Image: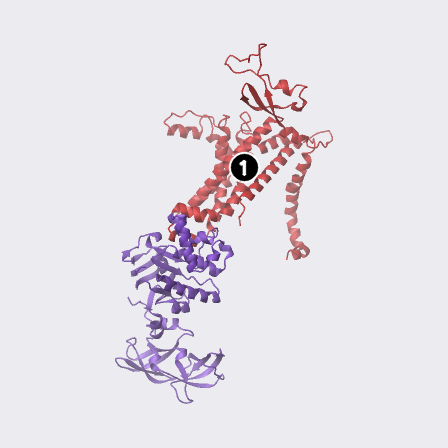
């Protein structure tokens, strides 16, 4: 059958050609191009010829080290403390800029912790990238259960035979069809520190006891705010996938469970959830992949700020590749992202595989 | 073990009346079969007994207790579905033990009861398999296993054999019969297959359009059908109906005849009014070939089907109606041949030309 299609159906291939060439040009070529670019020093616009530089881009992004700082001591060997009683350490740049340690050259402090009198400092070649990496992982870690779980809950709700259930289905699905940019703009107003809707509601609910928060302007709340809004936005999409899964479960299984006396929870536990296995794997992997690609919300709402607290990998890719015209650096991040998502999806697929 | 009593039970979906008033009593340990053509409401009636469908009006009693508003689990019933409804992600053992798991039974109790059910159904070797590794018959066995571990008061079977192929259906039919003897439980069984009904039932309930047409033992229904519908529904090939003229009628018998039928006297059982048309029902098996020129029924052979053990002859009677006769022997009839038949009028049934559709209740 397939051989006949490939041999004799010339018209079919001809019809497929426009679509296929676009996909080829804008998806497949750039995909392989990114791998190549990540091994060069290519800039977006540059008079200099492109050079092959091996894995330098990866080293510049991923190098991480731990250095130990001994406290400053007086000549008598006493630990020097500042006026708050905190131990004083030499500055990290005395090491990263020292000729004694060429391996740490150019690296910056990412974070540190104290062990005894000494301080352990984690230095990274690219601190912003590291922050973006951690933020992206945090984002995914929260989005997957919140969005997946919330979507399942909504799907269970709208899977009932009620009057006007389609209205609810529409309402829950609406955020999915509205452009993420529009939604991000709206939520910027909602999260606004001055007259934002959220602050207004919270202070009304607490009779004015709530102190308004600049949700997006605060390093503590900015990422959380983006997570909450993102989880809400795409929930409707996954709700529809869950719904399809729910409706594929044979009604007689529910009848059998009801005859056997299963409670609502037991019915879910023994009938619904096992019946949703494959759907769950799909939803899990799709949400994971989507959450690793988070960009528009960040771009519209915070631009990665404040203090890089909402940097993400894709945002960094774009900022580097186009903002800083460092296209090879951007390509490197996207390759790293690709490998990460591939790995995580593979692990998820393995962990959720059908056991015989 | 339980008795079951339905009093004027009705079911409507808006203006669509599906069950139009059913009165029925089922004794303890009785095997009752609901039979009827598709759409007659037999499955709906069963589901109303199970609690999966609401009862619009009337009362349903199990063991003397009205259970109209009780959820299925409190009615003490177990049900076996046509599509098996066994859980695909559980092993056979887990499926059979499902009701016990739900009820929070101990592991030891589950083990014991599952083992017992498996022994009764001879499926010990299947316990660790998954449903996808089972044949249709085995799956249905698992579903029956799930029903018997809970020792319900009433077993409900909703066309349990319809998804099986013919050979397997016969085996399972016998097994269900044996199971009933072994458990001595009250069972209600829905089928559209009259063979299942005839072989399994202590009591058959024939339904049509949401009404009970007749209730009785298989042989009562076969030998003394109360109306045209029951007469035509049970028996294969189905009963022949010959439209006849009523010449006279006394308290017990009516004298009937038509162009193909010599005048005979048949018991009318109060089913026909004085003069006019009536329908005479004669089972294909109840006619014999008579000497040429004699006999009571005259026709012409259209087609002969020789099956070895019996011969089925398709006839056209002299009044133009179709008639099927079967002879319990291998016999050759030529198409076009004139045939004269005879039968015992005591085995013929006289009906009014049309069934009164309002049910006897």
Q: Chain of mark 1?
A: A
Left/right placement of residue A57 relative to residue B112 reads right
Q: Which chain is red?
A: A
- Residue drawn at x 66%, y 57% is A4
Q: Quadrant of residue A38?
A: top right
Asked whether B208 or B92 is in front, the reply is B92
The reply to whether residue A161 is visible in this rendering is no
Name the image quarter holding the C terminus of chain B. Answer: bottom left
Residue pointed to by mark 1: A291
Residue A283 is situated, as x and y percent measured from the top left of the image, at 52, 43
Asked whether A41 or A318 is in front, the reply is A41
The reply to whether residue B76 is visible in this rendering is yes
SS class, disc 1: helix
Q: Quadrant of residue A121?
A: top right
Q: Which chain is purple?
A: B
Residue B171 is situated, as x and y percent measured from the top left of the image, at 45, 66
């Amino acid at each position: 059958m397939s051989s006949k299609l490939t041999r004799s159906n010339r018209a079919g291939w001809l019809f497929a050609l426009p679509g296929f060439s676009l996909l080829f040009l804008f998806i497949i070529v750039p995909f392989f191009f990114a791998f190549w670019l990540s091994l060069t020093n290519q800039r977006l616009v540059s008079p200099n010829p492109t050079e092959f530089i091996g894995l330098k881009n990866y080293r510049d992004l991923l190098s991480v080290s731990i250095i130990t700082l001994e406290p400053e001591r007086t000549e008598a060997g006493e630990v020097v403390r500042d006026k708050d009683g905190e131990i004083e350490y030499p500055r990290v740049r005395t090491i990263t800029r020292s000729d004694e340690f060429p391996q740490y050259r150019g690296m910056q402090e990412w974070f540190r912790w104290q062990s005894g009198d000494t301080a352990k400092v984690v230095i990274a070649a690219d601190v912003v990238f590291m922050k973006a990496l951690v933020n992206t992982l945090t984002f995914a870690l929260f989005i997957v259960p919140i969005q997946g779980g919330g979507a399942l809950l909504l799907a269970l709700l709208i899977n009932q035979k009620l009057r006007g259930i389609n209205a609810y289905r529409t309402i829950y699905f609406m955020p999915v069809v509205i452009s993420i940019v529009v939604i991000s703009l709206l939520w910027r107003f909602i999260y606004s520190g001055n007259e934002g809707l959220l602050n207004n509601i919270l202070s009304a609910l607490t009779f004015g006891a709530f102190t308004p928060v600049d949700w997006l302007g605060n390093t503590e709340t900015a990422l959380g705010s983006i997570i909450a809004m993102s989880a809400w936005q795409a929930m409707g999409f996954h709700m529809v996938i869950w719904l399809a899964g729910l409706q594929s479960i044979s009604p007689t299984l529910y009848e059998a469970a009801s005859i056997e006396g299963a409670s609502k929870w037991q019915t879910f536990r023994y009938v619904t959830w096992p019946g949703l296995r494959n759907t769950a794997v799909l939803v899990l992997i799709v949400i994971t992949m989507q959450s690793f690609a988070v960009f528009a919300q960040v771009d519209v709402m915070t631009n990665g700020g404040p203090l890089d607290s909402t940097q993400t990998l894709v945002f960094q890719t774009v900022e580097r590749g186009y903002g800083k015209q460092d296209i090879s650096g951007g390509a490197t991040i996207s390759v790293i992202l690709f490998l990460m998502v591939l790995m995580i999806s593979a692990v998820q697929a393995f962990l959720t595989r059908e056991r015989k | 073990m339980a008795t079951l009593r339905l009093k004027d039970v009705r079911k409507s979906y808006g203006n669509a009346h599906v069950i139009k008033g059913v009165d029925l009593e089922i004794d303890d340990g009785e095997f009752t079969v609901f039979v009827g053509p598709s759409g007659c409401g037999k499955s709906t009636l069963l589901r109303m007994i199970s609690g999966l469908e609401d009862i619009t009006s009337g009362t349903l009693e199990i063991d003397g207790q009205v259970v109209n508003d009780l959820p299925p689990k409190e009615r003490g019933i177990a049900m076996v579905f046509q599509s098996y409804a066994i859980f695909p992600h559980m092993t056979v053992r887990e499926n059979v033990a499902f009701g016990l798991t739900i009820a929070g039974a101990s592991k030891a109790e589950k083990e014991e009861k599952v083992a017992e059910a498996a022994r009764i159904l001879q499926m010990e070797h299947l316990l660790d398999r998954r449903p996808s590794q089972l044949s249709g018959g085995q799956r249905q066995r698992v579903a029956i296993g799930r029903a018997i571990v809970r020792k319900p008061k009433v077993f409900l079977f909703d066309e349990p054999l319809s998804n099986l192929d013919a050979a397997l259906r016969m085996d399972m039919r016998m097994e269900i019969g044996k199971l009933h003897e072994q458990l001595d439980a009250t069972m209600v069984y829905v089928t559209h297959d009259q063979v299942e009904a005839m072989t399994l039932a202590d009591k058959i309930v024939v339904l049509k359009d949401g009404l009970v047409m007749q209730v009785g033992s298989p042989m009562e229904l076969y030998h003394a059908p109360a109306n045209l519908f029951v007469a035509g529904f049970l028996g294969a090939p189905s009963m022949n109906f010959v439209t006849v003229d009523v010449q006279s009628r006394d308290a017990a018998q009516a004298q009937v005849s038509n162009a193909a039928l010599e005048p005979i006297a048949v018991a009318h059982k109060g089913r026909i009014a004085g003069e006019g048309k009536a329908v005479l029902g004669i089972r294909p098996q109840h006619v014999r070939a008579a000497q040429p020129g004699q006999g009571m029924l005259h026709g012409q052979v259209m087609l002969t089907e020789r099956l070895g053990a019996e011969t089925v002859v398709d006839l056209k009677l002299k009044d133009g109606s179709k008639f099927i006769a079967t002879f319990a022997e291998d016999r050759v009839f030529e198409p076009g041949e004139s045939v004269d038949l005879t039968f015992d009028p005591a085995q013929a049934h006289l009906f009014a030309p049309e069934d009164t559709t309002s049910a006897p209740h």
